[in-house]
């Protein structure tokens, strides 16, 4: 389980996040939504240990980020909105590098690589340099790199950004399947992705968590038929 307990975060004199508390179980897909400037990126950076909270704590698989940062972040993988892969490496070299820094055994690496290469259709680019990949392949390679160590928690910033329709459908199906054994947090502005994947929604506005609900609950709360309409109603309200 991942637990966020009363988090507050300042950048300079500005309070970015105010008293954020929630928990994630060991599976399912949670969508982190909010307008630009709501604090989504700051929250994700706190969850991966890039930032330290000014107040509160984050517990990941029983380890406190404050007291045992290395153990805590070892259970989390993160894919940023852009970048995240090393252009001079081949796809295989990059995935092996990501496995090595997470101390994945050779046997587990081979098994995980075979599974991810098949599921994300990466066989044809394994020996290709990352700098030559299309946007679609770059996203899939970055996600494969995050999952090569079988993390308990996967955080994805705009996972379907830049993908064509077929790639989006395939990636959504892959993530839904993967979420049976890994808790996934996605941050996105694409409401179609939220409708297709999310089991739960966290809605941030002005640094506060204003809604934590299942998609249907969110729609009922806002008295709207879609997540997009509910989002605008609650944020503007």
Image: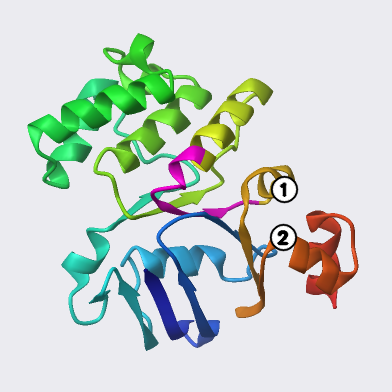
Residue 30, by quadrant, is bottom right
**Name of the residue lying farthest toward the top:** 124
Where does residue 123 sit, x and y in percent of width and height? 34, 13
Up/down of 219 relative to 171, above or below: below
Residue drawn at x 46%, y 47% is 179
Location of the C terminus by quadrant is: bottom right
Instruction: Report the side of 41 relative to 142 (left or right).
Output: right
* x and y percentages locating residue 28 in the rendered image: 51, 54
Distance between the alpha carbons at the discs numbered 2 and 1: 8 Å
The image position of residue 104, as x and y in percent, is: 14, 41
Looking at the rendered structure, the secondary structure element under dot 2 is: helix
Asked if residue 182 is among those painted magenta in the image, a careful observer would answer: yes
| Proximity of marks 2 and 1: CB atoms separated by less than 8 Å | yes
Residue 138 among those drawn in magenta? no
Residue 195's label in the rendered image is 1
Looking at the image, is 70 positioned above or below residue 119?
below
User: Which circle marks residue 172 in the picture?
Assistant: none
Residue 54 seen in the figure: no
93 or 222, nearer to the observer: 222
């Amino acid at each position: 389980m991942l637990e966020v307990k009363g988090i507050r975060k300042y950048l300079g004199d500005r309070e970015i996040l105010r008293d954020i508390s929630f928990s994630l179980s060991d599976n399912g897909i949670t969508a982190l939504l909010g307008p630009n400037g709501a604090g989504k990126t700051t929250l994700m950076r706190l969850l991966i240990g890039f930032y330290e909270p000014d107040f509160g704590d984050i517990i990941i698989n029983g380890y406190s980020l404050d007291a045992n940062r290395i153990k805590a972040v070892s259970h989390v993988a993160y894919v940023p909105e852009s970048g995240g892969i090393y252009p001079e490496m081949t796809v295989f070299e990059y995935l092996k590098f990501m496995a090595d820094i997470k101390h994945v055994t050779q046997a587990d690496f081979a098994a995980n690589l075979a599974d991810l290469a098949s599921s994300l259709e990466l066989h044809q680019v394994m020996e290709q340099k990352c700098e030559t990949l299309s946007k679609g392949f770059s996203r899939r390679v970055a996600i494969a790199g995050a999952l090569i160590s079988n993390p308990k928690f996967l955080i994805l910033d705009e996972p379907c950004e830049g993908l064509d329709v077929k790639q989006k459908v395939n990636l959504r199906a892959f993530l839904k399947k993967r979420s049976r054994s890994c808790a996934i947090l996605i941050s996105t502005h694409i409401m179609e992705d939220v409708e297709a994947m999310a089991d739960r929604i966290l809605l941030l506005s002005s640094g506060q968590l204003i809604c934590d609900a299942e998609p249907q609950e969110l729609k009922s709360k806002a008295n709207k038929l879609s997540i997009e309409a509910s989002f605008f109603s609650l944020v503007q309200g």
